[in-house]
Amino acid sequence: MTIAQKRAASPKFDNSFISQLQKQFPNIVPPAIALLIFLGLWQLFALTPGATLPGPIQVISDTWILILYPFYDKGGIDKGLFWQILASLQRVAISYTLAAIVGIGLGILIGVNQTMSKALDPLFQLLRTVPPLAWVPISLAALRQNEPAALFVIFITSIWPILINTAVGVTQIPQDYNNVAKVLQLSRKEYFLNILIPSALPYIFTGLRIAIGLAWLAIIAAEIVMSGIVGIGFFIWDAYQNNDVSEVILALVYIGVVGLLLDKFMAWLQNLILPAEQK
């Protein structure tokens, strides 16, 4: 009887798996075709006379060892791509977390206090337009060390979307909610936890999602000009100086994949935390 039940369940599992593939098929095929077309055009461009950029076939051939052995570690900065990316991600995690804490806190402060908003908004608008690379010499001059300077560049680049979106979210709280809070005579703690944070949460997550992309961009820029540290940015710069263009292209692919995964993770976290009516 048990064997018969198991045999009966097997086709259902197969049918379920096939149905899932059929559902995902329309989403998988278009990007797959676009990717193949891009790789084909890239390969054709690389075969034209005078082209100096290697094609995808040559990139894979030149970097096959790096692809097969991403975990090697010979000490110093001679490490595989896994360790290079991990070092960059660790810097991003530290600075991004600090930027989220400070950005959300300051965003709430200027969102509830009009005087603070008028006083600080021009300064914030001025600082947020400064490119990440422009902060590198300032951070190096002030901190004198590569590691804290890189962390500062990530922090100062990623804090602005979090801060601004949080402030906007606080100012967009419906007046009806504030009226209800006054009628119920909610304490500041109760107002903060039950009205302010839930209402501003969609805006906060928008800022967090934008900031994670900027943080990843900033660490690459910072590591390129900060020599002697393990990280994917310095790996790119070192490969370029050694004229290993294929290694640069491979690193760019890894950077793009990691950036995509970070964005997808933030989107998943947003869907997990936000109520259905706020998505």
Image (cartoon, helix red, strand yellow):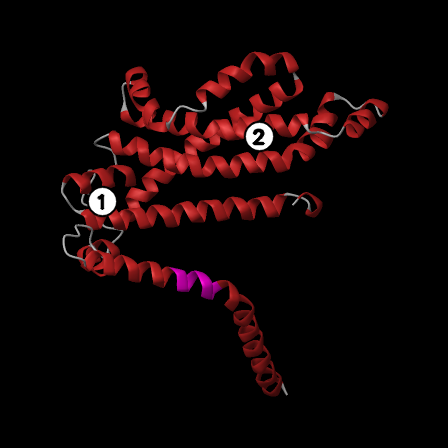
Q: Is residue 19 above or below residue 149?
A: below
Q: Which residue shows up at 65% across the image and 16% down it?
A: 113
Q: Is residue 98 visible?
A: no
Real-space Cα distance between discs 2 and 1? 38 Å
**Residue 79 bears which disc, if any?**
1
Crowdedness near tag 1: few (<14), some (14–19) or many (≥20) residues, C-alpha within 10 Å: some
Q: Which residue shows up at 39% across the image and 47% down it?
A: 258
Label 1 residue SS: loop
Q: Position of residue 252 (x, y in %)?
A: 30, 46
In the displayed image of the protein, which residue is found farthest to the right? 183
Residue nearest the viewer, comparing 46 with 171: 46
Side (left or right) of 159 relative to 150: right
Q: Position of residue 31 (x, y in %)?
A: 44, 60
Q: Quadrant of residue 86?
A: top left
Crowdedness near tag 2: few (<14), some (14–19) or many (≥20) residues, C-alpha within 10 Å: many
**Residue 165 bears which disc, if any?**
2
Q: Is residue 29 magenta?
A: yes
Label 2 residue SS: helix
Q: Is residue 27 magenta?
A: no
**Residue 162 bears which disc, if any?**
none
Q: Position of residue 50 (x, y in %)?
A: 14, 52
Q: Position of residue 94 (x, y in %)?
A: 42, 32
The amino acid type found where label 2 is placed reads Asn
Q: Quadrant of residue 279?
A: top right
The amino acid type found where label 1 is placed reads Lys
The overriding secondary structure of the stretch rendered in magenta is helix
Q: Which residue shows up at 66% across the image and 31% down it?
A: 197
Side (left or right) of 26 relative to 48: right
Q: Is residue 204 visible?
A: yes
Side (left or right) of 201 relative to 187: left
Span of residues in magenta? 28-34
| First along the sequence among labels 2 and 1 | 1
